[in-house]
Amino acid sequence: MKIVIIGCGAAGIVASHVIKKINPDADVTIIGREKSIFIRCSAPYALAGIDSLGKCEKPAAMVTGTGARLVHDEAVAVDVKSSAVKTKSKSFDYDSLIFATGARPFLLPIGGIGLKNVFTLRTADDAKKMSKALKGSHDVVIIGGGMIGVETASLLSDRFRVTIVEMLPSLFPLSYDKEYSKQVEYLLSKNGVKVLLGKPVAKLTGDKKVNAVHVARRKIKADVVLVAAGIRAETDLAKRSGIKTGKFGIETDKHMKTNIKGVYAVGDCAQTFSMLTGKPVQSGLVTTAVVQAKVAGMNVTGMDATFDGVLNSSVTQIFDRSLGRVGLTEEQARLEKIKYKVGTSETLDKYDTQPGAKPLKTKLIFDHGGMVIGAQVIGSGHIVSGIINMISFAIQRKSTVKGLLKLKYAAHPELTPLPFADPVVLACEAVD
């Protein structure tokens, strides 16, 4: 069995691990055009000096340790009729092919985007070049108020003057409702980050190297600019191969199969769908990529696994506050014309007898029948990710207000809210 995987990110690596675990004799080749295996989520921390760039790059043994073959080359053509992948230097035959080509950053179609010291943050080279440019710099402008933009702003704010520019009227516009976005905006402003909302960037200017970002009638000084305006699925190779693509990436079924027999797609390059609405959506989350890769890996080896869609569960850290979300927001529910109910709670993340107890705010969203369809949480520490993961499972199990009211939970002075102040139960009690 010959399997070729195009792409050496999380999706490609996980798929190879699953295949080799189920069938150690499988001949697995991963083709990766990047020089190293890069842990992309850690890039903002590397820029801030919290993690070293070296730790963000993993050795080839992450792939080859299972017996798979790693080829540093670029796939330039796929011949689905002869089942072969052509790279710049050679050709690889396959019985099954997995596209794990990932995504590329979206570059705004504005003047000056090609100036020096204008970066995206996707590869190890991106991180190294931006890290070098930051040395001796003072003013950093981040274009985009999503997770990467806001995380990077918070991490760089103690060393630089940082400005975030977001063309939509709120931060995290596709992930959180406005009251949660406002809290993040306040947190950033409190810590010295300037936030400009509802204003698109007009152009970048400078003499070879960027020195200003023009927003409306304002001119913002910039020694370094990070463009974090989202991603686009890397589908060019698939399109040239006759593989169907949709608005958000390569089209697949629940087995991660494309329209071509023996060809699969996983991760950021693959269009996925909402578990709640069934509609095509973009995910761009490594957790989505990992699950899809496992499904494809199992199916390649002859098993029957399915992918059930996404809830886009995510968490982030902004200064000393943790933020998490899952499922639909209120705004998304309205757009889907779903009749919904909301329950909220405000408590502390520890017993009030404990030093360092901090506020914990939780919002749950239920459909008209009482089934939970979304959650947003802001607090501190790991308790936020715990709540989000639990509600994610609750959504998958079609749990209801009545069911969650009977939640069997633990309590401890240093680790949880007071026994009578569980945030999920309190939010359920607040539902009309």
Image (cartoon, helix red, strand yellow):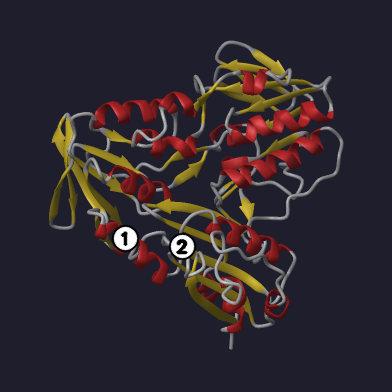
Horizontally, is 300 left or right of 217 in the view?
A: right
Query: How far across and down, in percent of the image, does residue 80 sit?
Result: 71, 28
Question: Do the residues under discs 2 and 1 have CB atoms within 8 angstroms?
Answer: no
Residue at the top extreme of this rendering = 89
Query: How far across and down, in percent of the image, does residue 199 sit?
Result: 25, 59
Q: Nearer the viewer, residue 78 or 410?
A: 410
The residue located at (69%, 46%) in the rendering is 252
Considering only order in the chain, which callout, 1 or 2, is on the residue closer to the N terminus?
A: 1
Identify the amino acid type marked 2: Gly
> Hey, which quadrant is residue 139 in on the image?
top left
- The answer to whether residue 347 is above or below residue 124 is below
Query: How far across and down, in percent of the image, does residue 125 sit?
Result: 40, 25
- The answer to whether residue 254 is above or below residue 343 is above
**Which label lies toward us, 2 or 1?**
2
> Of the numbered discs in the image, which one, if any, rests on residue 91?
none
Residue annotated with mark 2: 379
Query: How far across and down, in percent of the image, does residue 156 sit?
Result: 29, 42
Q: Secondary structure at mark 2?
A: strand
Cα separation, mark 2 vs mark 1, equals: 12 Å
Residue annotated with mark 1: 187
Quadrant where the N terminus is found in the figure: top right
The residue carrying pointer 1 sits among few (fewer than 14), some (14 to 19) or many (20 or more) residues within 10 Å by Cα, namely some
